[in-house]
Amino acid sequence: MKSEQELPEYLTLQEVSRMLKVHPNTLRVWDKNGALQAVRIGVKRIRRYRKSDVDDFIRKSSN
């Protein structure tokens, strides 16, 4: 079992939207087409983004 330090950090839709300076609907479209996929959590299937995925997306976008 992973320790707490090894668990991935998750960001909300709003946090990622502010980080990338895009509208939340843009993130929803990117999730749908696979550009930046979200993880669905819980019964309500709320979108969360792995911080590592967001960091990778930023790195790839800046090249």
Image: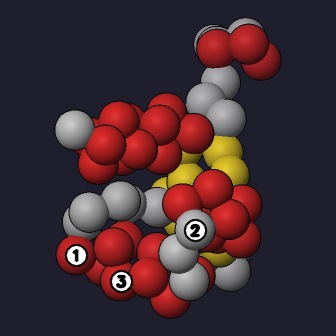
- Name the image quarter holding residue 46: bottom right
Q: Is residue 33 left or right of residue 50?
A: left
Question: What distance separates the C-alpha of mark 1 from that of mark 2?
Answer: 19 Å
Looking at the image, tell me whether mark 1 or mark 2 is earlier in sequence order.
2
- Disc 1 packing (10 Å; few <14; some 14–19; many ≥20): few
Q: Residue at x 53, y 75 (%)?
A: 22
Contact (Cβ within 8 Å) of mark 3 with mark 1:
yes
- For residue 33, the mark is 1
Q: Residues within 10 Å of mark 2 (few under 14, many from 20)?
A: few
Q: Quadrant of the C terminus?
A: top left
- Secondary structure state at the residue bearing disc 3: helix
Kindly identify the residue that appears in the image at 68 percent across and 65 percent down: 18
Q: Amino acid at mark 2?
A: Lys
* Secondary structure of the residue carrying numbered label 1: helix
| Residue 63 higher or lower than 18, as above or below | above
Check contact, mark 1 vs mark 2: CB within 8 A. Answer: no
Question: Disc 2 designates what residue?
Answer: 21
**As drawn, which residue projects farthest toward the front?**
63
Which residue is denoted by mark 3 in the rendering? 29
Front-most of residues 40 and 48: 48
